[in-house]
Image (cartoon, rainbow, N blue to C red):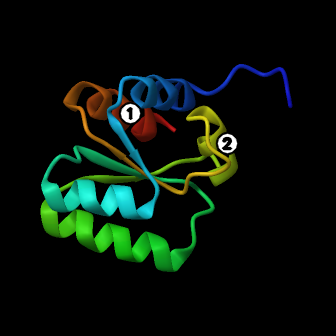
């Protein structure tokens, strides 16, 4: 493990997870989109094209913005206490706005 500071995106994802405002994984994110609670969907940089296409279609249909992270599934997973996470739905307006701004700046 490197001793680098985690990116601001990863730090914020960790906070969102601890606050209970994150739906990690394809199924949880898809359910969050379907229920209308997802405010933004984040995709790890190395998520499979098939997974990305399926979740993007559901998000676009529901009007939920989607951002691609520079970070890998392993890095995103480590930030939220999991082995890996390719799809993350953020279910809080404040976290979603901040994460969207950080993703746009990458």
Relative image position of residue 20 (x, y in whole percent): 35, 30
Q: Quadrant of residue 101?
A: top left
Mark 1 vs mark 2, CA separation in Å = 16 Å
Q: For the point 28% across and 74% down, which residue is it?
A: 57
Relative image position of residue 54 (x, y in whole percent): 37, 76
Q: Tag 2, which secondary structure?
A: helix
Q: For the point 52% across and 76% down, which residue is it?
A: 49
Query: 10 Å neighbourhood of mark 1: few (<14), some, or many (≥20)?
Result: many
Q: Residue furthest bottom?
A: 50
Q: Tag 1, which secondary structure?
A: helix
Q: Is residue 69 left or right of residue 2?
A: left
Query: 10 Å neighbourhood of mark 2: few (<14), some, or many (≥20)?
Result: many
Q: For the point 38% across and 33% down, which residue is it?
A: 99
Q: Which residue, given by chain and number where applicable, does mark 1 sit on?
A: 99
Q: Which residue, given by chain and number where applicable, does mark 2 sit on?
A: 75
Q: Is residue 77 left or right of residue 93?
A: right
Give the label, 1 or 2, closer to the camera: 2
Relative image position of residue 32 (x, y in whole percent): 25, 53
Q: Is residue 25 above or below residue 21?
A: below
Count up the numbered dots: 2
User: Front-most of 85 and 52?
Assistant: 85
Q: Is residue 47 above or below residue 16?
A: below
Q: Is residue 3 above or below residue 78?
A: above
Q: Is residue 92 above or below residue 53?
A: above
The disc, 1 or 2, on the residue closer to the chain's N-terminal end is 2
Q: Quadrant of the N terminus?
A: top right
Q: For the point 13% across and 53% down, which residue is it?
A: 36
Q: Is residue 90 left or right of residue 33?
A: right
* Residue 71: assigned label: none
Q: Quadrant of residue 75?
A: top right
Dots 1, 2 in contact, CB < 8 A: no
């Amino acid at each position: 493990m490197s001793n680098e500071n985690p990116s601001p995106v990863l730090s914020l994802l960790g906070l969102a997870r601890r606050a209970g405002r994150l739906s990690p994984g394809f199924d949880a994110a898809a359910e969050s989109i379907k229920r209308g609670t997802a405010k933004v969907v984040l995709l790890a940089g190395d998520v499979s094209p098939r997974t990305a296409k399926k979740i993007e279609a559901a998000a676009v249909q529901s009007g939920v913005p989607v951002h691609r992270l520079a970070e890998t599934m392993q890095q995103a997973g480590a930030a939220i206490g999991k082995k890996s996470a390719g799809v993350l739905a953020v279910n809080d307006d404040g976290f979603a706005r901040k994460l969207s701004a950080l993703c746009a700046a990458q």
